[in-house]
Amino acid sequence: MSSTMEFTQEDRQLIQQQVERFFEAEYDMEKCRADIISCPQQAWQNAAEAGILALGQSPDVGGLGGGTCDWGMAMRQIGSTLSALPLLDSAILPARLIDVVVSGARREELLGTICVGTARFAWAHREKRSGNDRQFVESRFDGKAISGTKIYVIDLGNVSDFLVTARDDSGALCLLLVKPDTAGLTSHSYRLPDNRLAGELVFDQVEGELLATGCDQAIEQVLDLAAACAAAESVGAAERLLALTIDYVKTRRQFGQALGDFQVIQHRLVDGYIGLRTTRAIIDQALAALDNREAIAAQLCSAAKAQADKACRVVGETSIQLHGGIGMTDECAAGHYLKRILTNNSRFGTADWHLSRATKESFNEAA
């Protein structure tokens, strides 16, 4: 991995303020009400110019420095503003994967294109029968071309390159670079529950550039990072949703008084707040462990994802209940935040799988 430049506390505060201003300026609830939520190329370039895409990357490839904790901060802002910017799938995960498995001038070139926004990757790894099995890859690479099917590819219609995993004749897991217009590649797009765009890729003897082989361990590391970042995004969404709900119960009246005056309502909101603060602390610990390459990092990432899926869903469902029927309408923001939370819950491993994994690794450590 490349070396990163650590930020001082003052630097980190300034960068966080810049990131917050960028996403708040981009925030528009009308975008969330569209049939399909997508990120136009101009918004991608705006993110590059603001330094968002260079965050967490080493200065030796044009990055700003920092680490996974800074990625987590940016992901919270994406959740808070329901941004369609595919930062995780098109920048963070490709950057970490390329950094870990690609070497030499090609590595520097690919990472540099992410920082300046000239490349917009999509990672194609998950397959139809993979479930929670991270190493399940049936797609084949015969030394020249790829055959197989990939699902849940985010931002399908806007990417410049696909990063595709496939196994060679020896069973080794390979990472390949494929252009969207390559012969033999077909795609089908569909909407996720929160209206973001995803899709399926079918490879029929599609030629690609071999970037690396033997990527099994790297995939595990990248998916741990993905789980922690998805958890951070969900927490950002739930925190904003909780704030909106608190404002709403202060004005909605029931039985002659504000709904928020009822003690049982106050207790439910406080429980949600405590759950989110606990979750955020676990996520921060997991991201720090990834930065420091601690042996416990994988366990912490699973704990963070499991806790976030549960705590954020509780906040989301409580908010809908307190808003009443209007909560699930397009006019109300609450439903849009819950949809983003539930969509994230289904990504990079379910809560039950991560809880089982975290517990199993904990017992193994104790033994």
Image: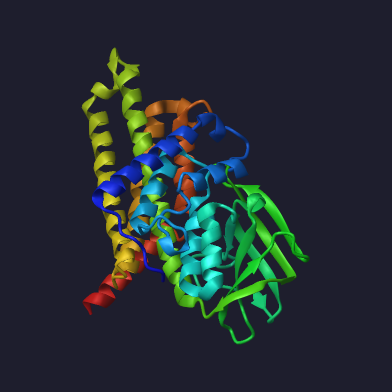
> Residue 137, position in %: x, y?
58, 73
Which quadrant is home to the C terminus? Answer: bottom left
Above or below, comparing residue 208 to residue 228 in the picture: below
The outermost residue toward the bottom is: 170
> Residue 125, position in %: x, y?
57, 66
Relative placement, left or right, of 294 versus 217 is left
> Residue 168, position in %: x, y?
62, 81
Relative placement, left or right, of 247 versus 174 is left
Using the rendered image of the protein, determine whether residue 309 is visible from the camera's viewpoint: no
Residue occupying the point 48% across, 54% down: 88
> Residue 38, position in %: x, y?
59, 42
Residue occupying the point 36% across, 66% down: 356
Above or below, comparing residue 164 to residue 119 in the picture: below
Q: Foreground residue, 125 or 174?
A: 174
Relative placement, left or right, of 224 versus 134 is left
Using the rendered image of the protein, determine whether residue 259 is visible from the camera's viewpoint: yes
Q: Foreground residue, 256 or 98?
A: 98
Residue occupying the point 48% across, 52% down: 53
Which quadrant is home to the N terminus? Answer: bottom left
Above or below, comparing residue 149 to residue 197 in the picture: below
Q: How many marks?
A: 0
Residue occupying the point 24% across, 22% down: 261
The color scheme shown is rainbow
Q: Foreground residue, 241 or 113?
A: 113
